[in-house]
Amino acid sequence: MRTCICLGLIVATGFLHAGTGGKEDPGALLDKAIAAQGGAERIAKNKMLKFRAKGTLDLFGMSMKFTADYAFAHPDKLRFSMDATFMDKPIKMLVVCDGAKGWEQAEGMTREMDKEKLDEFKHTAYVVHISSLLPLKDKSFKLTPLPEATEDGKTLVGFNVSHKGRRDVKLFFDKKTLLLAKTETRVLDEFAMKEVTQENLFSGYHDKGGRKVFDKMVIKRDGKTFLSEEFSDQAESGKVDPKLFAEPK
């Protein structure tokens, strides 16, 4: 069960090789990034997002292929289910957070998350929430400019996001397109039982109903590729289905 919840945490969500270039005003950069993504009005219509994924997880020196289904509702509801095979053992799991409590279901058992796991899952949801950019217009967030950086031959510009009671998250944007290219934050690596720097790298952007969305993500931990996945069947909704985020039976 402990391994299963960890797998859910790592594939659900926050990335950088620092450079020496100039810094851009965070407020102006945020406005331009919101416009590049489709505009504030378009972003605000998306209250809930559902999508499917398939990918590969590198774990203990081995690669594990998986399929997954995600659902996220702003600002803090997250659901993740996965089917995979690891060391010839089938894995089927479900992890749900309603914003206040979280549950994990695997091996025929359902139990409430302990505080440590719940905090990590809430942080994952927080990173997804602020990555939609529009929430950052709220004055409770402090945006601090970061130096230009490079990643995969692209020049990135970005800012650090601080909020009371939250871990810092760095957001980086492709300087040419102003689309989100990376996030970076600290997370608990439950396998190594230590904090690591997690980088999420986004690519494969395309238009989805007037909004730019990515369909590929690579997660790195302390600079090493940890997970790669591709997304499909992305569907947005202006309404939230509370049943999706209720305690699983």
Image (cartoon, grey):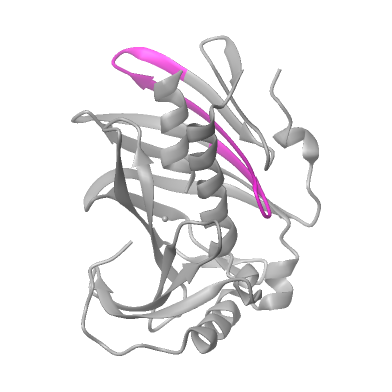
- Is residue 199 shown left or right of residue 95? left
Can residue 232 be seen at all in this image of the molecule?
Answer: no
Q: Is residue 83 magenta?
A: yes
Q: Is residue 45 above or below residue 1?
A: below
Q: Position of residue 174 (x, y in %)?
A: 38, 76
Residue found 40% across the figure and 45% down from its top = 229
- Is residue 1 shown left or right of residue 126? left
Can residue 58 be seen at all in this image of the molecule?
Answer: yes
- Is residue 157 shown left or right of residue 114? left
Nearer to the camera, 15 or 70: 15
The quarter of the picture where residue 188 lies is: top left
Range of residues picked out in magenta = 69-91
Secondary structure predominantly adopted by residues drawn in magenta: strand
Q: Is residue 215 above or below residue 25?
A: above
Residue found 47% across the figure and 65% down from its top = 205
Q: Is residue 81 magenta?
A: yes
Q: Position of residue 249 (x, y in %)?
A: 71, 17
- Is residue 207 shown left or right of residue 230? right
Nearer to the camera, 208 or 174: 174
Q: Given the current orientation, which residue lies at the most extreme front position?
A: 164
The quarter of the picture where residue 171 lies is: bottom left
Q: Position of residue 104 (x, y in %)?
A: 57, 24
